[in-house]
Image (tube, rainbow, N blue to C red):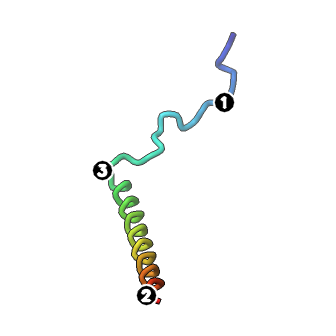
């Protein structure tokens, strides 16, 4: 049986779906995500404090 004609090639095999730690891209993206998370948490804490004060 000839398996070479059984279908299209599978692209993207062996390519990691994540960024390696320590690379510039990984650090920039994680820093931005962390800053956004921190801002969201501070806004939620402020809203909770204001609601509790009322």
N-term mark: 2 or 3: 3
When the figure is inspected, residue 12 is found, relative to residue 29, above or below; the finding is above
Query: What separation in Å lies between label 1 and label 2 (alpha carbons)?
Result: 64 Å
N-term mark: 1 or 3: 1
| Disc nearest the viewer among 2 and 3 | 2
Q: Secondary structure at mark 2?
A: helix
Q: Residue at x 57, y 36 (%)?
A: 11
User: Which of the numbered marks, if any, corresponds to residue 46?
Assistant: none
With 17 as the anchor, is 11 left or right in this view? right
Q: Position of residue 18 (x, y in %)?
A: 44, 46
Q: Nearer the viewer, residue 21 or 9?
A: 21
Q: Nearer the viewer, residue 45 or 12?
A: 45
| Residue that badge 2 annotates | 53
Q: Position of residue 20 (x, y in %)?
A: 36, 46
With 16 as the anchor, is 1 left or right in this view? right
| Residue that badge 3 annotates | 22
Q: For the residue carrying disc 2, how many other residues have a C-alpha within 10 Å: few (<14), some (14-19), or many (20+)? A: few
Q: Nearer the viewer, residue 49 or 29?
A: 49
Looking at the rendering, which quadrant does residue 5 occupy?
top right
Answer whether labels 1 and 2 touch (C-beta < 8 Å). no
């Amino acid at each position: 049986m000839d398996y070479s004609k059984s279908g299209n090639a599978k692209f993207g095999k062996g390519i990691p779906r994540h960024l390696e730690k320590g690379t510039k891209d990984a650090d920039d993206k994680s820093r931005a995500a962390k800053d956004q998370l921190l801002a969201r948490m501070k806004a939620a804490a402020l809203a909770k404090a204001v609601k509790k004060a009322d």
